[in-house]
Image: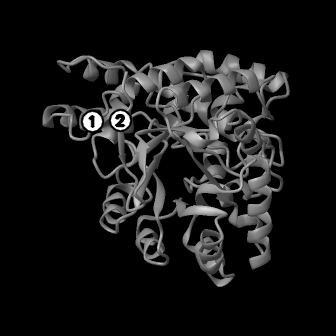
């Protein structure tokens, strides 16, 4: 296995086409803030030893709320000790929702450097930018902050991750001399948020392009529903659903790297292996057409377009919003309503989630959702399916 590398925009860096995302690390006792440190460390170091040189974390990852740092940054700082730190580019993100002044920016970065046990963040992003948050940060002097942090060595490269409508992307790209950007992109999301047009625009401007959610929160990793699997089986070259999805992103030479939020050692080993075959332009026109057919088949079945990023959490009512939506989607995608109902009931009784019917329609989730989902409306539909006697037709009602 030989890792492949690509230019990282105009920075002069060469980055592995597979980056290690630290948002979905293995956890203990079902608690997002309790990372399984021995296993996660083994996973991260295996990836680095096999050529991965880009590690992505953020202020809120593996935490209970956005008001206090999660445990992901501290984990990364610890796991990269013993010589691993010098072998990778470390990325983390400024949380705009906590920035009220120019001084806040310096204070937040100082805390991140301390947790990462480093004097420098290689790749520093403004987290989850939307038009409104970018305007607010710009007004508080974020451009001057980034210039100063680069000048004094606290950060090396400045970028942003993006979660807004397509038309808002280019003005942000043009608003600062960015080194790179991070966008959601996969074969289901070619016209979503930045999309293919944003990818092209950023690359044209010389930015490195980091792709997040290449597997759409794991939903494209399989097992595929029967209609989709039947399409995959038509291909002369047999690949797993995850490989098809990753190869689609890697096929575009304008993508510098994709991030995989790996939760098991098996996923790390598989993805490192797949990265050895992720050459740009390696998919044939016939294979790209097949992916288009799969896209259409999936779109006909998806109920709630949630990627389980958990930005909507915690819910004041105690509802595991991504968990509820995952149950609805899995019931539809895999024709497994009864299985999902049993799992949902177990989670409710164990206290892992309140029932969907307990939604108070406060709107906090919708304000935080980077996918801009109508969460209140979808939660009401989910309640009608999950919180009363079921018939198979109910899943169809939820998507209406």
Instruction: Look at the image and tell me whether residue 160 can be seen.
Output: yes
User: In the image, is 252 to the left or to the right of 172?
Assistant: left
Q: Residue drawn 19% across and 36% down?
A: 289
Q: Please state the horizontal and vertical placement of residue 128, each as a whole percent of the image.
A: 59, 59
Instruction: Look at the image and tell me whether residue 127 can be seen.
Output: no
Q: How many marks?
A: 2
Q: Please state the horizontal and vertical placement of residue 304, each as a whole percent of the image.
A: 53, 41
What is the quadrant of the N terminus in the image? Answer: top left
Near-viewer residue (322 or 182): 182
| Distance in Å between CA atoms under marks 1 and 2 | 8 Å
Specify the quadrant of the image occupied by residue 109: bottom right
Q: Which residue of the protein is positioned furthest toward the left in this rendering? A: 285
Q: Residue drawn 56% across and 35% down?
A: 261
For discs 1 and 2, the disc positioned in front in the rendered view: 2
Question: The residue tagged with tag 1: helix, strand or loop?
Answer: loop
Mark toward the start of the polypeptide (1 vs 2): 2
Q: Please state the horizontal and vertical placement of residue 298, each as a whole percent of the image.
A: 37, 34
Near-viewer residue (388 or 305): 305
- Residue at numbered disc 1: 279
102 w.r.t. 191: above or below? below
At label 1, counting other C-alpha atoms closer than 10 Å, the crowd grade (few under 14, some 14-19, many 20 or more) is some
- Residue at numbered disc 2: 4
Q: Residue drawn 60% across and 42% down?
A: 86
268 w.r.t. 384: above or below? above
Near-viewer residue (69 or 194): 69
Q: Please state the horizontal and vertical placement of residue 365, each as a whole percent of the image.
A: 70, 53
């Amino acid at each position: 296995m030989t890792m492949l590398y690509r230019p990282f925009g105009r920075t002069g860096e060469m980055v592995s086409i597979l980056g290690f995302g630290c948002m979905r690390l293995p956890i203990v006792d079902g608690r997002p803030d309790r990372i399984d440190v021995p296993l996660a460390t083994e996973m991260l170091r295996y990836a680095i030893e096999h050529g991965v040189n880009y590690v992505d974390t953020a202020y809120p990852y593996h935490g209970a709320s956005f008001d206090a740092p999660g445990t992901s940054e501290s984990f990364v700082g610890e796991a990269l000790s013993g010589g691993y730190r010098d072998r990778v580019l470390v990325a983390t993100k400024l949380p705009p929702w906590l920035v009220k002044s120019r001084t806040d920016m310096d204070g937040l970065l100082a805390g991140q450097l301390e947790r990462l046990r480093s004097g420098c963040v290689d790749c520093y992003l403004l987290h989850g930018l939307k038009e409104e948050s970018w305007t607010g940060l710009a007004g508080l002097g974020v451009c001057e902050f980034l210039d100063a942090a680069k000048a004094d060595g606290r950060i090396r490269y400045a970028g942003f991750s993006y979660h807004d409508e397509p038309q808002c992307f280019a003005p942000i790209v043009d608003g600062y001399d960015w080194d790179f950007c991070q966008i959601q992109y996969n074969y289901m999301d070619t016209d979503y948020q930045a999309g293919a047009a944003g990818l092209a625009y950023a690359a044209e401007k010389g930015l490195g392009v980091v792709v997040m959610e290449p597997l759409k929160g794991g939903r494209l990793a399989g097992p595929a529903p029967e209609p989709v699997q039947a399409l995959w089986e038509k291909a002369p070259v047999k690949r797993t659903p995850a490989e098809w999805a990753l190869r689609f992103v890697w096929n575009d030479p304008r993508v510098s790297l994709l991030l995989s939020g790996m939760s098991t050692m098996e996923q790390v080993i598989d993805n490192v292996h797949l990265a050895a075959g992720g050459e740009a332009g390696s998919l044939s026109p016939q294979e790209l057409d097949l992916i288009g057919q799969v896209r259409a088949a999936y779109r006909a079945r998806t109920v709630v377009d949630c990627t389980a990023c958990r930005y909507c959490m915690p819910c004041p009512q105690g509802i595991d919003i991504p968990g509820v939506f995952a149950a609805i989607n899995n019931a539809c995608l895999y024709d497994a309503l009864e299985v999902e109902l049993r799992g949902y009931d177990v989670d409710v009784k164990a206290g892992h989630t309140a029932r969907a019917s307990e939604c108070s329609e406060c709107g906090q989730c919708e304000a935080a959702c980077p996918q801009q989902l109508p969460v209140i409306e979808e939660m009401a539909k989910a309640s009608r399916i999950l919180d009363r006697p079921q018939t198979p037709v109910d899943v169809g009602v939820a998507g209406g």
